[in-house]
Image: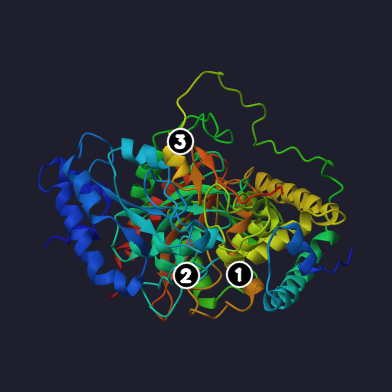
Amino acid sequence: MSLPLHRESIASLRRKLTAGEITSQDIVQDLLQRIASVDPKVKGYLRVDAEKALAQAAKTDLKKPLGGIPIAIKDNINEKDEACTCGSQILKGYQAPYDATVTRKLKEAGAILLGRTNMDEFAMGSSTEHSSYQKTANPWKLDHIPGGSSGGSAAVVASDQAIASLGSDTGGSIRQPAALCGCVGLKPTYGRVSRYGLVAFASSLDQIGPFSKTVEDSALLLQAIAGQDVMENTSRPVPVPDYRAALNQPVRGLRIGIPKEYFAEGIDPEVNAALKKSMDWFADQGAELKEVSLPHTHAAVAVYYIIATAEASANLARFDGVRYGHRTQTLGDPLTIYRKSRAEGFGPEVKRRIILGTYVLSSGYYDAYYNQAQKVRQLLRRDFTNAFQNCDLLLTPTSPTPAFKAGEKMSDPLQMYLADICTIAVNLAEVCGISIPCGFSSEQLPIGLQLIGPHFQESSLFRAAHHYEQAHDWYLHRPNL
Amino acid sequence: MKSSIDVAYVAGLARLELSEQETETFQKQIAGILDYVEALQQIDVSSVPDTPIDPNLPTNVLREDTQRESLPVESVLRNAPKSANHLVIMPKIVE
């Protein structure tokens, strides 16, 4: 008995495509049917361009590494001649004049760009409830949130409406929704993947990465999008290794650090139990587990909400109603047009963060907030450097709890911010992290485990994650839709 | 330092018009967030230099100064709320 095509991974579909058993059109047709039946419930896509996807499928070059594979893209990554709303009214009607580097690379690798996924407005949020277009549901429990900000990209992969997708991660926006929806989500090292064409939220933290059904697929996608880019001067000239080769290296001998601060109060007991079991498994396989300390962990959320909002307030200054985006109908001088266009175009969470970011950068407060946060960021980075002197990887929960109910944290922004407590420090230290499924709560909601690696050591993440994944069957579970 | 934010004033700096309702809600919420981040000021940062250099970030990334094709004007201006003759149109600002 074979699985329907939409259930399969990139690797298995590629085998069937190159063996001539199926065509790319078969995959696209099957996904379009799946989307038609499931997305009215999940609402993960903002747009699906069926005609374009089928046309691309007809021209598939199977010799290319991702030839014939349909992939969904978060709606903050430019794709030439497509809309790119960032989940915001202010970009309603905008059509990208160019391809982001990752979009160009996916096209060059033969992938089919299937559709654009929902997100928190300008990637600000942890539940995708801050999208100004629609609320995406958690495929496992429709009245629960899928996580965020890349909630659409996670939900469409978890509900088999895409074979894989791209998202962006500024404080956990790939890993947290991957954990809450039960798929694989990778945040590469800062500088591993070009940000050119990703609409900027917090430029020193943003990084594009893949969502997938398996760790192997995550490696295949990173292979396609990684590398230095002349268009983006924080992308680094570090050689891109063969990530797939890392999958077969044994777990035995890996030194895995368990940061005690990540297992403190506030962790849901079921999450804690699932993590403990995964630690036992790694120990049984001959990995060396050791307790480590990242002493500044408690400061990470505060540092993040100063640095990220400061950078956002500067980045979002470009939305002024002049060259692109929404312009108010109100007549008046330029200042009035800026103020009104922004008031009409931005939603509440974006406004809140612009104000906070403007404040921490303003005269008289800059030293106390922004400068202090930058210094504590260096201490957080040192924590990781020290920990990685004695271990190859760190193992933590991805999210302190499984998915929460929609609406639960909307009126209390601070509670929403604390949902990212396990993922934020990874962005601040610019290291890499992956979330993979490691169990289910008693309510049948997925639980994710996070592996964190040193700068540019994604191979170590893939190695450990792949072995864990293949020895368990969590990645084969599917929501009942 | 204990600070109190004047949301209406900061919104002016950010070129953002807020309704009275928004100003009131944000005033409360942002004050709460600032209380939370206040704890950072207790952390000893004396071991970090005043201008922290991020060792992972490159400096002076240079490229050849060569001519390249730019985006077609039409594809850029189609996003402008108003344009004519290859220019973005704004309301009159001088009498």
Name the mark on residue A206: none
Mark 3: which amino acid? Answer: Val
The residue depicted at 77 percent of the width and 68 percent of the height is B8
Disc ID at residue A274:
2
* Secondary structure under the numbered disc 3 in the rendered image: helix
Question: Do circles 1 and 2 both sit on a common chain?
Answer: yes
Query: At label 2, which amino acid type do we have?
Result: Ala
Nearest the eye: A327 or A81: A327
Q: Residues within 10 Å of mark 1 (few under 14, many from 20)?
A: some
Q: Do discs 3 and 1 belong to a common subunit?
A: no
Which image quarter is the N terminus of chain A in? bottom left
Nearer the observer, A156 or B82 = B82
Where is residue A139 shown, x and y percent of the image?
A: 36, 72
Q: Nearer the viewer, mark 1 or mark 2?
A: 1
Q: Give the SS element for disc 2.
A: helix
Q: Amino acid at mark 1?
A: Pro
User: Which residue appears at 82% of the width and 44% of the height?
Assistant: B48
Residue identified by numbered label 1? A348
Residue A251, can we see it?
no
Does residue A184 lie above or below B75 as drawn? below
Residue at image location 64% in from the left, 31% down from the top: B58
Q: Position of residue A298 (x, y in %)?
A: 71, 63
